[in-house]
Amino acid sequence: MATDRIDADTAAVLVGDAVTAPSMHNAQPWRFVFRRATGVIELHGDPERAMKRTDPDHRALHLGCGAGLFNLRVSAAWHGIGAEVGLLPDSSDAWLLATAALGTPTAEDHGLAVLYDALRHRHTSRRPFSDEAVPPPVLDGLRAAARLEGCRLTIPDRWHTEAVLSLVRDAEHHEEMDPLAQAETDAWTAHPQGVAPAPRDDGIPAEAFGPRSAGPTPVRDFGRARPVPDRGWAVFEEHPQLALLGTPNDTAADWLRAGQALERVLLQATADGLATSMTSQPLEWPELRWAVRDPLESMGHVQMVLRLGYGPPGPATPRRPVTEVLELR
């Protein structure tokens, strides 16, 4: 498709799909700029939506923006548009994270279009999953999805899964002892409907908290900061199916690649009928993050812990309108 056929309305459609991506605390830390003359969409990080305490290096911010970039690629492919991506194109502008030059689709772009239907069906589920194991061929497909984005997905064995769950609990205790971390989580956690301020278009709404856990689980409990009346309790799966997403190195470019791989894995899992959730808790504390990695694996740096399984899908979480995140130039 020639760039002269890519107008502002088309750019808005692509960005509207891009922002369905997950981000830490649903902060949606992105801004997009569409350059009409060149048919380029720029992806910028938004420092005002950064987690200054628990993400001081902006690793999680880059992951969220990378996930949004992958959604943009999927949407462009589905609409018959190619997207040639450049990561960190301007060393003098640290917040210009990527560019996507829109034009004629390639064979690689055609391969992305099949994930389009999963874009708006992918939601984080903080509810119990069944004990049904995810079949090896499905896990192999998710590993392949990560490799396509230059990353690695590993499935920890039983002992390593228990170790990661222990680190999640340690991270919870770290946050409980850190008023600044608590305040940061609280700032991005919505009040229950009818209890406090009007509904917002970012953050974690009360209906997405899920039930309280009656046992260990990698699901982050946002209800600790915002008690919800009649929320209820539930027993989560005894042996959660975890997956670790990692990169060889730990640079800003690696984080952006990991964000794209994360979203590719999540969309593929959704297309395969899986429910998913993520936890970054042990990755937010340097003294814990190194221990998440399996020392017997060749993965360099863990970027996200995923939970996979069969269970109820999570509710849709709010998104800011495209007019707030897209600038036309």
Image (cartoon, helix red, strand yellow):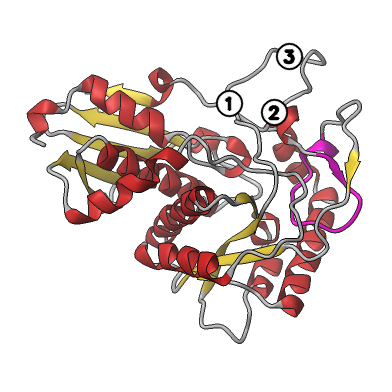
- How many residues crowd around disc 3 within 10 Å: few (fewer than 14), some, or many (20 or more)? few
3D distance between C-alphas at marks 1 and 3 = 15 Å
* Secondary structure beneath label 2: loop
User: Type of residue at label 1?
Assistant: Pro
Label 2 or label 1, whichever comes before in sequence order = 2
Q: Where residue 18 appears, x then y in whole percent? A: 40, 36
Q: Nearer the viewer, residue 144 or 51?
A: 144
Q: Nearer the viewer, residue 52 or 280?
A: 280
Please state the extent of the stretch shown in magenta in the rendering. Answer: 211-225
Q: Nearer the viewer, residue 292 or 74?
A: 74
Q: Count numbered badges in the picture.
A: 3
User: From the viewer's perspective, is 63 left or right of 56?
Assistant: left
Q: Quadrant of the C terminus?
A: top left
Query: Residue at image x 57%, y 35%?
Result: 27
| Residue position marked by numbered label 1 in the rendering | 318
- Disc 2 to disc 1: CB gap under 8 Å: yes
Query: Residue at image x 19%, y 42%?
Result: 101
Label 1 or label 3, whichever comes before in sequence order = 3
3D distance between C-alphas at marks 2 and 1 = 8 Å
244, above or below 262, in the image: below
Label 3 or label 2, whichever comes before in sequence order = 3
User: Type of residue at label 3?
Assistant: Pro
- Disc 3 to disc 2: CB gap under 8 Å: no
Q: Which mark is residue 205?
A: 2
User: Type of residue at label 2?
Assistant: Pro
